[in-house]
Image (spheres, helix red, strand yellow):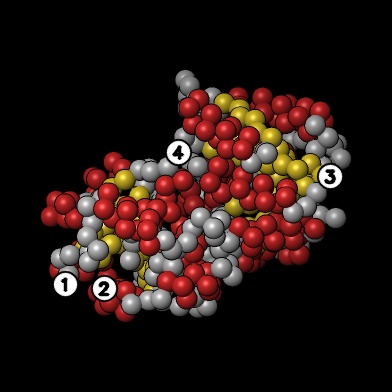
């Protein structure tokens, strides 16, 4: 038996632990001799932490949360939390005989970088390209002290870790190209998989949920599911829907998000009655997706987006929903070459909105089963387990 400690640093609204990582870790435990511990540094509410704790118990994951101090000044609170976290982690690793430590992204990497002289293996979850994402979308300057400090810590972890996992092959190429001393064979791509027994087409759920939402059988439903912000291409989605609505007024845009205010503030008045904005639990997502005819997986293709693997893409495709997805995002283009009835949205194309609208009618006649069958090769939780186990094997 090998004990793995996964360390993450999260905000208030993320459900990655209960929706993504814990189900994958549970499946790994059932198919190997690895046992998972999770320490989540978070400033989420006690109610949110309780939900994560409950999920951990149900999935046999050993879970601990640590509060990130945010007052009186966030940066000082973060530094204090990091300082205390280093000592807490060192003690936890010793007391629980941890074999493999998995820091996820920058802040956990900083803490693990300070832990010395322990007989452990380190598998660094580099995630996407998080520092570059802050440059692209949060106005972090590469010349700033903050960027240089975080970059130094990230490089230290990339060099010292026994293995590194990413979400795209492209991000591996970027890391290796910028750090000539890095060994490429220490990197592995892992997949963000979903339970294909939960995310699947279901006519009964479709009819029931449409009735509940007062959507007729004939109405064409566009859907977006996920966070909203600068990088998520909301304006493009609204523009495509708006132009399609000029052709077919019997259409609805269903927006499933925790960022309700963001969406409501940006929906044009003339489309307000055509849009349904909902915040739902993770368990409800498949039933809401089941009402859809077309899905959006659009993101701004900035440099950092080459490192991401949108979870929503797997959800849509396992549900058999034809999808309009951005080119230039992670490995999306390579994957969608092998999945029928999807449309690559080219952000460089001057006619991108009208071209996407023109593609909709062809997508609407798609065979859901064909889409799902092809998606099973990439987006299931079984594929995730296989990819993680391959990364663990490299540590031997």
User: Is 364 on the left or on the right of 77, as rendered?
Assistant: left
Residue 389 spot, x, y in % from top left: 74, 57
Residue 122 spot, x, y in % from top left: 76, 47
The tally of labels here is 4
Which callout, 3 or 4, points at the residue further toward the start of the chain?
Answer: 3
Q: In which quarter of the image is residue 4?
A: top right
Q: Which residue lies furthest to the front in this view?
A: 204
User: Is 339 on the left or on the right of 58, as rendered?
Assistant: left
Please give the residue where the numbered disc 2 appears in the rendered image.
Answer: 357
Real-space Cα distance between discs 3 and 1? 60 Å
Please give the residue where the numbered disc 4 appears in the rendered image.
Answer: 13
Real-space Cα distance between discs 3 and 2? 53 Å
Q: In this view, does 252 lie above or below 257?
A: below
- Mark 1 residue element: helix
Would residue 180 be seen by someone viewing this image from the given angle? yes
User: Is 245 on the left or on the right of 20, as rendered?
Assistant: left
Real-space Cα distance between discs 1 and 4? 37 Å
Real-space Cα distance between discs 1 and 2? 9 Å
Q: In this view, does 201 lie above or below 354?
A: above
Tell me, yes or no, whether the two marked residues, 1 and 2, touch with CB atoms within 8 Å.
yes
- Mark 2 residue element: helix
Please give the residue where the numbered disc 3 appears in the rendered image.
Answer: 1
Residue 161 spot, x, y in % from top left: 76, 50
Which callout, 1 or 2, points at the residue further toward the start of the chain?
Answer: 1
Q: Which residue lies furthest to the left in this view?
A: 270
Real-space Cα distance between discs 4 and 2? 32 Å
Label 4 CA crowd tier, 10 Å (few <14, some 14–19, many 20+): few
Please give the residue where the numbered disc 1 appears in the rendered image.
Answer: 247
Query: Which residue is painted at 48% across and 48% down in the image?
Result: 134
User: Is 73 on the left or on the right of 32, as rendered?
Assistant: left
Real-space Cα distance between discs 3 and 4? 34 Å
Label 1 CA crowd tier, 10 Å (few <14, some 14–19, many 20+): few
């Amino acid at each position: 038996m090998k004990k793995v400690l996964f360390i993450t640093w999260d905000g208030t609204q993320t459900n990655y632990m209960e929706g993504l990582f814990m189900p994958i870790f549970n499946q790994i435990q059932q198919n190997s001799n690895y046992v998972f511990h999770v320490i989540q540094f978070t400033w989420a509410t006690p109610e949110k932490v309780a939900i994560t704790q409950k999920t951990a118990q149900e999935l046999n994951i050993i879970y601990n949360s640590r509060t990130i101090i945010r007052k009186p000044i966030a940066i000082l609170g973060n530094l204090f939390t990091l300082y205390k976290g280093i000592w807490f982690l060192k003690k936890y690793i010793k007391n629980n005989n941890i074999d493999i430590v998995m820091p996820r992204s920058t802040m956990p990497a900083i803490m693990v970088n300070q832990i010395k002289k322990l007989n452990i293996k380190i598998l660094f979850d580099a995630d996407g390209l998080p520092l570059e994402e802050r440059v692209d979308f949060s106005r972090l300057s590469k010349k700033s002290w903050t960027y240089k400090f975080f970059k130094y810590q990230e490089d230290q972890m990339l060099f010292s870790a026994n293995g590194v996992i990413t979400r795209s092959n492209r991000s591996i190429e970027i890391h290796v190209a910028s750090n000539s001393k890095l060994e490429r064979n220490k990197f592995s791509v892992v997949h963000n998989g979903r339970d294909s027994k939960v995310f699947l087409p279901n006519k009964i759920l479709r009819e029931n949920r449409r009735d509940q939402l007062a959507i007729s059988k004939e109405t064409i439903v566009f859907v977006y599911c996920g966070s909203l912000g600068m990088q998520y291409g909301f304006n493009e989605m609204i523009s495509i829907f708006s132009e399609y609505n000029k052709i077919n007024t019997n259409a609805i845009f269903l927006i499933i998000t925790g960022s309700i205010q963001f969406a409501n503030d940006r929906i044009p008045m003339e489309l307000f009655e055509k849009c349904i904005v909902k915040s739902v639990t993770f368990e409800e997502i498949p039933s809401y997706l089941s009402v859809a005819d077309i899905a959006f997986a659009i993101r701004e293709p900035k440099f950092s987006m080459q490192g991401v693997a949108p979870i929503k893409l797997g959800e849509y495709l396992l549900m058999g929903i034809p999808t309009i997805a951005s080119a230039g995002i992670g490995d999306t283009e390579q994957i969608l070459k092998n999945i029928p009835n999807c449309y690559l949205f080219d952000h460089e194309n001057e006619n991108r909105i009208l071209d996407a609208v023109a593609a909709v009618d062809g997508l609407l006649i798609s065979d859901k089963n064909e889409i799902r069958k092809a998606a099973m090769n990439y987006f299931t939780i079984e594929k995730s387990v296989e990819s993680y186990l391959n990364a663990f094997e490299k540590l031997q």
